[in-house]
Image (cartoon, coloured by chain):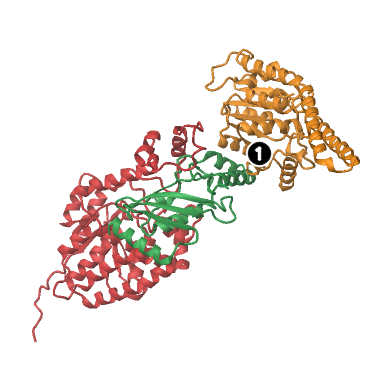
Amino acid sequence: MTAHTRLAKEIKEYSRLGAASDVLLQVDESNILLWRAFVKGPADTPFEGGTFELALNVPEHYPLQPPSVRFRTKVFHPNFHFKTGEICLDILKHAWSPAWTLQAVCQAIVTLMGDAAPDSPLNCDAGNLLRANDWRGYNSLARMYTLELAMARK
Amino acid sequence: MEVVLRELRSLCHSLLTRLSHLFRDYPPGTLQLTGVLGLAAVLYGIYAVRNGRKPPGEAGSEDSAATAAADASRSGNGAGPAGQALAGPDPPARSWAATQPAQAPARATGAATSRAVRAALAGVKVVTLSAPGVLLEEWDAAALQDAATLRPEAAAVAREVARAARVYVIAHVADDVGEATVRGACEAGGLVGDAHYQVPAHRLLFCSTLEGKVSMVRQLEPELHIDGDPQTVEDLKRFMPQLLHIVRPGVRAAASRFPNVGSAASLAAAFGAS
Amino acid sequence: MAAGSPAPAQSSHSGVSAQRGSTCSAEQVESIAANVPSHSGSCYGDAVVDIVALSPAVQNAEVSSRPTDEEIIAQENAIRASEAEKLGFVGDIEPLVALEKEYEAGSEVFVRKIRSLESSYRSMRRTRGDGNCFFRSFIFAYMEVLVATNDLAERNRVVTCLRQWRPKLMETGFQELVFEDALEVLIDQLNSLGTAEPLTVRQLEDNLRDASLSPMIVMMLRMLDSAEIQRRGDFFYPFILGMSDEATTVEQFCRRYVEPMGEESDHVHIVALTDALQVPIRVVYLDRTAMPGEGGSSAVATYDFTPAGCAGTPPRVHLLYRPGHYDVLYPALPAPPSVPAAST
């Protein structure tokens, strides 16, 4: 199955289901390998209320290889690089399996938002806040960035 | 002031003239009463303005504050031991300690403060302030459990800074009670709010550890960070373009050998706004 | 990390192994962090990051020479791709003595063991050492036997079994779209047996060597494997517990060590797959363990994986295990009887 075939199936399945409550997927009109996703910050996290944009680049050998996914909206979180949007998630690297779909990947990223792993972080300041157990500081800063960068301006 | 009073008098006169035309057809007593009431209203207005509803510009202090600030920027590099040149604007913080003796905080004055602050900022666009000791009279999280007292002159300076730059305020508190106390004081004192000269509520940040505060400042990447805690200043000295230590009485200025670190007795003193 | 899988020191595929068991290593993180400029510049003013700037070429150019996870994966893929020139996914049948030659210069224990094997096995077929070799060897060998024997009863049984797996896979949480094509291909190929155009060994070789089809089939077998383990979590959990250092659930184990391509197979993987498809197999272990009475018996250890429903059935598939790697073995045909059977 080529990437195209598989992606066509995913598109069909996604349209059939209707948008999942927290992931909105869009494929580029001229290139089936380029996708955008819009995810909602999970409830009960400082990201709640924000909408975060992701860029997904699907490789030719998908689904044998994982898509390359980055945030286009800045997020303050230990496992996301604040400036480049890089995401540190094992299923996007060595733990990738063809059982994952683009939608499932986005959902895993949303789960990660609420489930920060402070060891070996991509954002050292976020990681340090959590390692110091300073949840007040982490939540405060993450909420500020969500308001400023992930919500439509008033 | 003379000019203002003169203007007001001539305005009253013309008003009275117009009123008298209006009241031509009314009994003479009415005109007199209206006139007296009107004048009383105008005089009250002058009185109110003079006594600082909106801080008026005092002609006297205006010039000296501006000069002091200008002196501060000019003598920046000469003040301390020769350090390596830093990319960026001259660090006025360095000279703040040298040229600005600690003064009893005077009431902040409008245009003078604004000019002084802008001059002191010298183009800095992102500023972070640690609230305890700098904006608040309480110096640490423990003290903030009982009360949070906003220093009015510091708040005035902070508002001016917020006009010229993006400002984040960070308060290290012990718990939710401390957080609520600080937030309440900042809002009541007009530091935090929706107006263009206030710090927006979402930029009032809290943390529960000092290490956490350091991480937050590093994440925010300000060009200038102002803190009342010497340990924080030590922790940040290698990472900030400029640091200003507001020194608690009895405490030594931190990292004084670092060219990017300056100190002052108060925010108002640092910004030449007193 | 699964303790059962030996370090891939000897197998040909190891090359550069990706960081296992961690998300981003500390070194990688440092190298990334050190190379991103720390000045705020226009970053805060522009909340949306330009996608062009994030293209791997540009991003990797900014990062230091320490390889990122993506680079490591790319490198591994390149190594695998180059190995395709040397050895396809599945090799040709070769005599077992060829194996002997491989170890001539090395361990005597090995050579003796191989020799003792030759009484039971005549030939072998190599598969590529890419971490998928168990699955590939298994399915190739199984289908090859079906083709050679035209065993339609067994074919019918396994097709039914595969069809039953469709709802079970979905119950386990696999979306139909990720496995349905591979399942259909396998079923179609099986169903072609006994028809005018049955699957041939040659075609089977082509299919299992195909760059798209072969991984697809392996992928599906891994899902079957994972689903079987998850459905019988209580049974498999003690094995899993013994295999990994960190606390892990059955589901986590499957997601991490069963489903991803290239994850090496262990006892658990084999038990689960043979149970899932109800196919008994025999694995012949060729490793350095000196047999008791050093220099004496050089019998090779074998282990039969016999699903509960197949008790008494002889193994349908024979695999050769060398540390980190599985190949296909072909049993020697029984010698013809020395006395012709009396005719009635």
Out of A56 and C280, give the one closest to the viewer: A56
Q: Any idea which chain is the orange one in this picture? A: B
Find numbered disc 1 in the image and state the secondary structure of the residue it sits on. Answer: loop
Q: Any idea which chain is the green one in this picture? A: A
Chain label for disc 1:
B
Residue in view at x 32 percent, y 44 percent: C74
Residue in view at x 66 percent, y 33 percent: B129
Residue underneath mark 1: B199
Residue found at the very far bottom of the displayed protein: C344
Residue C46: tell me if it is visible. Answer: yes
Q: Quadrant of residue C325?
A: bottom left
Out of C230 and A18, give the one closest to the viewer: A18
Q: Chain C is drawn in which colour?
A: red
Residue B228: tell me if it is visible. Answer: no
The relative height of residue B40 versus residue C333 in the rendered view (above or below) is: above
Out of C320 and B154, give the one closest to the viewer: B154
Where residue C220 appears, as percent x and y from the top left, is: 32, 63
